[in-house]
Image (cartoon, grey):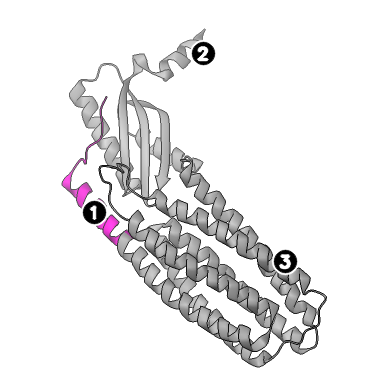
């Protein structure tokens, strides 16, 4: 069995640089998110006190959850970015998925509580106060949120961090939420107070949907789901370009944070020497490291005479 090593110093240096870059931008995202989330929370709290609006209260509750989650994310990311150690040979990347699952639970609980309150106030006609102040504060929050969303999208393109994706999901929904709140306050100013409560219900529905999507993706990571089919095909196609490689068998993949783990059997011609087979496996490793800069790869060189491919060929002939 041929186990992978870091084939060349160039590959090692590239991996180290990519990992440092990942940590740098994820930490910057954490600092930026905490700063903006705290600012938005204080602004929305002042709007809640001034307006007595259900939709503003729903938006404030969401902002409170966002700040709590951002603080937890920041703490978890510091742990998730630690390198592998004696007790965690595959690293700590799954901590991101655990945090995302907890975020989903927080979102669900907050949404259910708000939904109950919004339905209870749906037929009430309590006046919404200081509407212009509420709309101004909400517009300012929307601009701050837009700034954060654009920054997080750029960071995700560089890192692919699940924790930053989870944050982006909240704040992207906040953009729509802030616009809905502004609309609700406008209708309340025209004596359509029920619209304010209806918007609160819509916000709760979106929060529940977001929680479901977040939990689904987190569970995929925690349960070691394979990489998407198109990526599996790309891995196979890259390896099959190697001379003397007849097939790729038992391809198994998973992802934990930024790290991708790949395990497979490479079917080679029977007449190859051990040295030649080793060289082919080394080249295959380098190909996969080019596709995934933070990959850990295990390749078993399988002679054709012992492979599943041969058995399938014999069965087809029979």
Residue 53 screen position, x and y as percent: 69, 82
Do we see residue 139 in this rendering? no
Q: Which one is closest to the eye, mark 2 or mark 3?
A: 3
Q: Give residue 231's quadrant in the image.
A: top left
Span highlighted in magenta in the image: 1-22
> Label 3: how many residues lie within 10 Å, few (<14), some (14-19) or many (20+)?
few
Label 1: state its secondary structure.
helix
Q: Are marks 2 and 1 in contact (CB under 8 Å)?
A: no
Decide which of tag 1 and tag 3 comes sooner along the chain.
1
Q: Which one is closest to the eye, mark 2 or mark 1?
A: 1
Tell me the number on the disc at residue 316.
2
> Label 2: how many residues lie within 10 Å, few (<14), some (14-19) or many (20+)?
few
**Viewer-side residue, 235 vs 54:** 54
The residues tagged by marks 1 and 3 sit, at their Cα atoms, a distance apart of 50 Å
Residue 250 screen position, x and y as percent: 42, 28
Label 2: state its secondary structure.
helix
Residue 303 screen position, x and y as percent: 31, 19
**Viewer-side residue, 154 vs 199:** 199
Residue tagged by mark 3? 116
The residues tagged by marks 2 and 3 sit, at their Cα atoms, a distance apart of 62 Å
Instruction: Please identify the dominant SS of the magenta region.
Output: helix
- Say above or below: 60 vs 84: below
Left or right position of 191 against 268:
right
Q: Look at 22% across and 28% down and name the residue there.
A: 278
User: Any magenta on residue 96?
Assistant: no
Q: Look at 39% across and 64% down and name the residue there.
A: 74
User: Any magenta on residue 7?
Assistant: yes
Left or right position of 159 against 199:
left
Q: Look at 66% across and 87% down and name the residue there.
A: 51
Residue tagged by mark 1? 16
Decide which of tag 2 and tag 1 comes sooner along the chain.
1
- Point out the image quarter for the N terminus: top left
């Amino acid at each position: 069995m041929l186990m992978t090593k870091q084939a060349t110093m160039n590959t090692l240096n590239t991996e180290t640089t990519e990992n440092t870059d990942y940590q740098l931008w994820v930490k910057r995202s954490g600092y930026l998110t905490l700063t903006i989330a705290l600012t938005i929370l204080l602004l929305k709290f002042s709007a809640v006190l001034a307006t007595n609006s259900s939709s503003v209260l729903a938006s404030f509750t969401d902002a409170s959850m966002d700040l709590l989650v951002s603080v937890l994310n920041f703490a978890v990311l510091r742990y998730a970015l630690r390198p592998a150690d004696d007790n965690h040979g595959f690293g700590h990347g799954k901590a991101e998925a655990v945090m995302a699952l907890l975020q989903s639970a927080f979102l669900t609980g907050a949404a259910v509580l708000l939904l109950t309150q919004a339905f209870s106030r749906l037929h009430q006609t309590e006046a919404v106060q200081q509407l212009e102040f509420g709309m101004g504060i909400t517009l300012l929050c929307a601009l701050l949120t837009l700034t954060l969303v654009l920054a997080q999208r750029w960071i995700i393109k560089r890192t692919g961090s699940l924790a930053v994706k989870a944050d982006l999901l909240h704040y992207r929904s906040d953009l729509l939420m802030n616009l809905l709140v502004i609309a609700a306050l406008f209708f309340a100013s025209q004596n359509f107070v029920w619209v304010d409560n209806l918007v609160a219900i819509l916000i709760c529905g979106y929060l529940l949907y977001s929680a479901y999507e977040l939990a689904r993706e987190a569970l995929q990571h925690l349960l070691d789901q394979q990489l998407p089919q198109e990526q599996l095909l790309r891995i196979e196609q890259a390896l099959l370009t190697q001379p003397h490689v007849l097939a790729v068998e038992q391809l198994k993949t998973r992802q934990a944070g930024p790290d991708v783990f790949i395990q497979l059997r490479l079917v080679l011609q029977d007449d190859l020497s051990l040295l030649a087979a080793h060289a082919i496996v080394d080249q295959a490793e380098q190909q996969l490291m080019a596709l995934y800069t933070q990959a850990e790869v295990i390749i078993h060189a399988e002679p054709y005479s012992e492979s599943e491919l041969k058995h399938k060929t014999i069965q087809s002939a029979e």
